[in-house]
Image: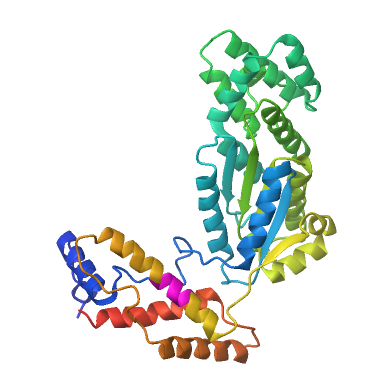
Amino acid sequence: MGLKERLGRIGINDQDIIKRKLFKAFGFIANPFPPAGQPFGHPHLEDEADEKIATFISSFEFNNTSHALLIEGRQGVGKTNLLNYYESELKDLYLEDEGFYIIRYLPDPEPSFDKIIRFIFNALGKNHISKLGQELATKNDQELEGMIARVRSYDVKNVLINLRKSFQDDENNSYIIDDTLEWLVGLRLLNRHRYSLGVQFRLDTVESKTQALRDIVECSVELGILKGIFLLLDELEKQDSSLSHISVLRYLSAIRAIIDALPNNFFLMAALTVEAKRRYFGMLPAFAGRMQNSVVLKPLQDDSEAMDIYSFYLFVARKKAKKEMRNSVGALYQTEFLPVIEIKDIFDLLLKESSDRGIEGVTQRDFLNKVHLYTEEKIQTLF
């Protein structure tokens, strides 16, 4: 039998039939448990780590002092899931407030400080530059002079002055907005940038980039168009031993430079494995000094924790299915799917495998992947 015959051809109507059959038998319309290769789209089960993070965010909102928070734990314990959750929660929290920017960044395996800064400026975008020009245009000469005096970069001062002039003159501002963003992200300096913005140099060093970021952020805060930037930085362990020692040091130094450049209105959440933390902190003590606040994510330690996460994922899947299948009758929330003893057996087997390898506990990813496979087998019995 070929692959085509094994898989069959499922049409839209067939998919509806499968969903109704699953819903009637199990109360969900798709496997509730993600395989190991699916890092996104998971529900998040809150625990004590969320209380700590909420405390840091509350402090940030209250006094605007910048925070750097390390999310640490070994591979598979849910660091990416946690950042996914807070990316969604923060966007929802500040949905009605345009002064907050939530930026998610996945580092490239070949680290480059340019990419982080470029990503931040692109996230602020043309819309923010337009607001900047509009607010500057409302300031009189004395107010502008006081603001410009606090800007450290000579080129940024000229950019702000020319932005204001363009918006005051009620010109077509699209060209100067484009030029400003191109200059901020470090593109090649052209004559039109020199003419429209009054800049002399390209932003091509860590110092010049961080200085420009600091000036733009501080000016935006003073004008009331920026209240906070959340940068969620995932998978820092990619900067590993496969790269030269100097490359990693430069990258870590650049992250530290961003933290130092923004003493206010900046919140960094960075996910890192325990092993990478040990290496990086040893390589650059100054980086370690900035990342002292941490939240530790731990693997599952006993079968009660395994049952909690199993029950939570099943509940979320059934709730979602009930909403989608409003006119169908499905299994009740409390209906047993996999027997409790079976869940415990799965966990105990994984725990023994971990112990044999000298590893503590069972990662959430390993457990959910194993339950996913068991669930697939049970689903196949319906067809």
- The single residue placed furthest to the top in the displayed view is 169
- Residue 363 appears in the rendering: yes
- The single residue placed furthest to the left in the displayed view is 13
Q: Is residue 109 left or right of residue 281?
A: left
Q: Residue at x 74, y 21 (%)?
A: 157
- Location of residue 5 by image quarter: bottom left
| Numbered circles on residues, count | 0
Instruction: Please name whichever residue, 109 or 342, is drawn nearer the observer in this view of the structure.
Output: 342
Q: Position of residue 374 (x, y in %)?
A: 37, 82
Q: Position of residue 216 (x, y in %)?
A: 69, 30
Q: Position of residue 68 (x, y in %)?
A: 72, 52
Q: Main secondary structure of the magenta part?
A: helix
153 drawn magenta: no
Please give the range of residues in magenta: 309-314
Instruction: Please name whichever residue, 4 or 18, is drawn nearer the observer in this view of the structure.
Output: 18
* Up/down of 96 relative to 376, above or below: above
Instruction: Please name whichever residue, 93 or 41, is drawn nearer the observer in this view of the structure.
Output: 93
Q: Position of residue 181 (x, y in %)?
A: 59, 29
Image color mode? rainbow
* Up/down of 35 relative to 204, above or below: below
- Residue 238 appears in the rendering: no
Q: Is residue 98 left or right of residue 55?
A: left
Q: In which quadrant of the rendered image does the C terminus lie?
A: bottom left
Q: In which quadrant of the rendered image does the N terminus lie?
A: bottom left
Q: Residue at x 36, y 84 (%)?
A: 338
- Location of residue 290 by image quarter: bottom right
Q: Residue at x 30, y 59 (%)?
A: 323
Q: Residue at x 72, y 19 (%)?
A: 158
